[in-house]
Image (cartoon, helix red, strand yellow):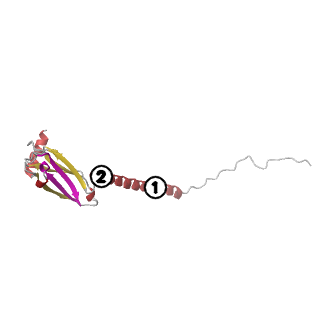
Amino acid sequence: MAVTSREIRSTRRMPSVPVPVSSFGNTAYIVTGLLAILALYVLVSGLIGWGQVVVDDWRYGRPRTFHLTADVGRAEETMGPTRLIAMNLDRQVLILEIPGGDVSKTRTIIGPYLVGANEDLTPITMRLADLNNDALPDLVVGIKNEEIVYLNRGDGFGLVTAEERQNILRQMSVR
């Protein structure tokens, strides 16, 4: 008897049977991916909010304070320019006007009360602009995306009346 070798493995391929793919497996990956994106969004948003508070702490301090020095046309400005200090004191906007740097003549302008979460951290800004063309700079107070106008009346700043507002808007439309 002769020994012969023979290939045990067949070179023929077996017909492939399709393996059922579970739609639950794909859905789980999609849901997991969406949850990961949501978690990343919440984390990044919190980090950006925290960073903004830190930058505002460096810029405005606590309580939030903004300082402006300028000649605003006061008789008391013989010693120097008027100093304007805006503060957010526990959600109450307060502006101190120190004419000519003489603290004995300090005037206080009470601004609005800020309502909402973390409004005690809202910075208050100021700028001067002659809005009613009387050659005296008027005070424009910025709070978030709003501005409050205090007209320079010669002896102090006061809120704009409805008539003055119409005149200012008319003048701005002419420009």
Q: Secondary structure at mark 1?
A: helix
How packed mark 2 is, by other alpha carbons closer than 10 Å (few <14, some 14-19, many 20 or more), is some
Q: Secondary structure at mark 2?
A: helix
Residue 89 part of the magenta-drawn span = yes
Mark count:
2
Across and down, in percent, residue 138 comes to 13, 47
Amino acid identity at mark 2? Asp
Tell me the chief SS of the magenta region. Answer: strand
Measured Cα–Cα span from mark 2 to mark 1: 30 Å
Would residue 112 be seen by someone viewing this image from the given angle?
Answer: yes
Does residue 127 appear in this view?
Answer: no
Mark 2 touches mark 1? (CB < 8 Å): no
Q: Magenta region: which residues?
A: 79-101
Q: Please give the name of the residue rendered at 84% of the width and 47% of the height, measured from the top-left corner.
A: 5
Question: Depth-wise, is mark 2 or mark 1 nearer the camera?
Answer: 2
Instruction: Judge by depth and name the residue closer to the eye, 149 or 4.
Output: 149
> According to the image, label 2 marks what residue?
56
Residue at image location 26% in from the left, 60% down from the top: 116
| Circle 1 crowding by C-alpha within 10 Å: few under 14, some 14–19, many from 20 | few
Furthest toward the top, the residue is 175
| Residue 141, x across and y down, in percent | 18, 50
Query: Which amino acid lies under the numbered mark 1 shown in the image of this protein?
Result: Ala
**The label number, if any, that marks residue 57 in the structure image:** none
Tell me where residue 164 appears, x and y as whole percent: 8, 49
In terms of depth relative to the viewer, which is nearer, 113 or 4? 113
Of 101 and 121, nearer the camera is 101
Extreme residue in the front direction: 79
Q: Residue at x 53, y 57 (%)?
A: 25
Side of 17 where 140 appears, left or right: left
Q: In terms of sequence position, does the residue under pointer 2 or pointer 1 come before the other? A: 1
Magenta-colored stretch includes residue 44: no
Residue under numbered circle 1: 36
